[in-house]
Amino acid sequence: PFQNIVARKGGPGGAPLCTGSGKACMAPGQAELKGVAKTQEGYIAMVVSAEKKTYFLRLNEPVLNGYVLKITGDSITFRENVLDTLGRTSTRDLVKRITGSGI
């Protein structure tokens, strides 16, 4: 009848386990922003995952532990749900800027 409030759920660091593949299983902390394109509907970000897979992300698209909060001409912002060591959930914003060779 009791739950351990200190126990972590999921994978390492309290991260939920992802059983599939694709954008929804991409960890924002390990992603690299490679480019941004502007369309009539808004910006699209091209990111490369730690597994060297390329994904195109739009606003509000889900990723592992969160979603795409904002895309600008040179950056993408993820809002992540994080779990601390006491089991409390909070959110943090992670900004990634374009990497690689400059113009």
Image (spheres, rainbow, N blue to C red):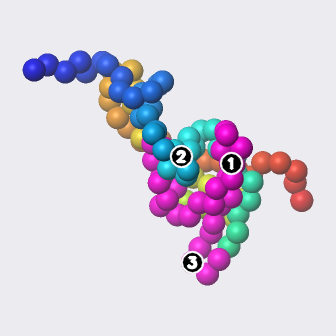
Q: Residues within 10 Å of mark 1 (few under 14, many from 20)?
A: few
CA gap between label 2 and label 1 equals 10 Å
Say the numbered circle drawn on residue 41: 3
Compared across the picture, whether 82 is left or right of 98 comes to left
Amino acid carrying mark 2 in the image: Ser
CA gap between label 2 and label 3 equals 26 Å
Residue furthest bottom as drawn: 40
- Report which residue position mark 2 lands on: 21
- Disc with the residue nearer the chain's start (2 vs 3): 2
- Disc with the residue nearer the chain's start (1 vs 3): 3
x%, y% of residue 83?
39, 31
x%, y% of residue 93?
51, 45
Residue lying at 70% horizontally and 63% vertically, measured from the top left: 36
Residue lying at 45% horizontally and 39% vertically, measured from the top left: 19
Element under disc 1: loop
Q: Residues within 10 Å of mark 2 (few under 14, many from 20)?
A: few
**Do callouts 1 and 3 mark residues in contact (Cβ within 8 Å)?**
no
Q: Is residue 94 visible?
A: no
Whether residue 48 is situated above or below residue 5 in the rendered picture: below
Looking at the rendering, the stretch of residues picked out in magenta corresponds to: 39-68
Point out the image quarter for the N terminus. Answer: top left
Compared across the picture, whether 44 is left or right of 101 comes to left
Amino acid carrying mark 3 in the image: Glu
- Report which residue position mark 1 lands on: 53
